[in-house]
Amino acid sequence: MWDFGAVQVRDWRPAPRTAQAPGREEHERDASLHEPQQERARELYAAVETQQRRLSQALERSTDLLSASEDQADRLVAALQHAAANVTPGRAKTEASARRAQVLQRRAEHAKEVRSHIVAAAGALAAIAGEVTMLHQHRETRHPSDYYLG
């Protein structure tokens, strides 16, 4: 134990020697260890690219299907409304034909609701597609090695 006035120090040892710069062998070893990690990062990046492409294609097909569904729903609403209005001429309406007209009108209202759900789904799908596009653009501005965390 050393006594320096008010401070006592136990087992004092000189500072360890500073580390020397790594030699050529250490660099080569580090490079050989780093290479498989970089290759794995490239493989993962390629897999992400493939999945992003597939997702974009699926979103595009889904958007096309929703668009066609919206058109079909519009035609269904128009046909149901037309049928409800023309079940029987106004002067010859019976109780049964009035009920059929009401049923057709309810179906037309339901078809309108379905159509509005289709439109909402198309909007949500468009938002998702926009997010995927932004992610893809962000990834394109980065180098695959930016994703390496090792």
Image (cartoon, rainbow, N blue to C red):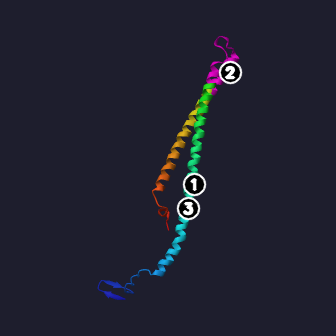
Q: Nearer the viewer, residue 128 or 32?
A: 32
Would you identify the image quadrant in which residue 23 lies? bottom left
Residue 2 on the magenta span: no
Disc 3 marks which residue? Answer: 44
- Looking at numbered disc 3 in the image, what kind of residue is underneath it? Leu
Helix, strand or loop at mark 2: helix
Residue 31 image point, x, y percent = 50, 74
Q: Residue at x 51, y 44 (%)?
A: 127
Q: Amino acid at mark 1?
A: Gln
Q: Residue at x 67, y 16 (%)?
A: 88
Question: Can you tell which mark lies on residue 86?
Answer: none
Tell whether position 100 is magenta: yes
Q: Provide the residue designation for mark 1.
A: 51
Query: CA gap, disc 2 to disc 1?
Result: 51 Å
Would you call the spot at circle 1 few (<14 residues within 10 Å), some (14-19), or many (20 or more)?
few
Residue extending furthest toward the right: 96
In three-dimensional space, the C-alpha distance between marks 1 and 3, rounded to whole angstroms, equals 11 Å
Residue depicted at x 68% and y 21%: 100
Quadrant of the snapshot with the N terminus: bottom left
Secondary structure of the residue carrying tag 3 is helix
Q: Is the stretch drawn in magenta largely helix, strand or loop?
A: helix
Q: Nearer the viewer, residue 141 or 118?
A: 141
Q: Are marks 2 and 1 in contact (CB under 8 Å)?
A: no
Of the residues under marks 3 and 2, which one precedes in the sequence? 3
The image shows residue 60 at horizontal and vertical percentages of 57, 44
Q: Is residue 101 left or right of residue 12?
A: right
Span colored in magenta: 80-107
Q: Nearer the viewer, mark 3 or mark 2?
A: 3
Q: Earlier in the sequence, mark 1 or mark 3?
A: 3
Residue identifier under label 2? 100
Q: Are marks 3 and 2 in contact (CB under 8 Å)?
A: no
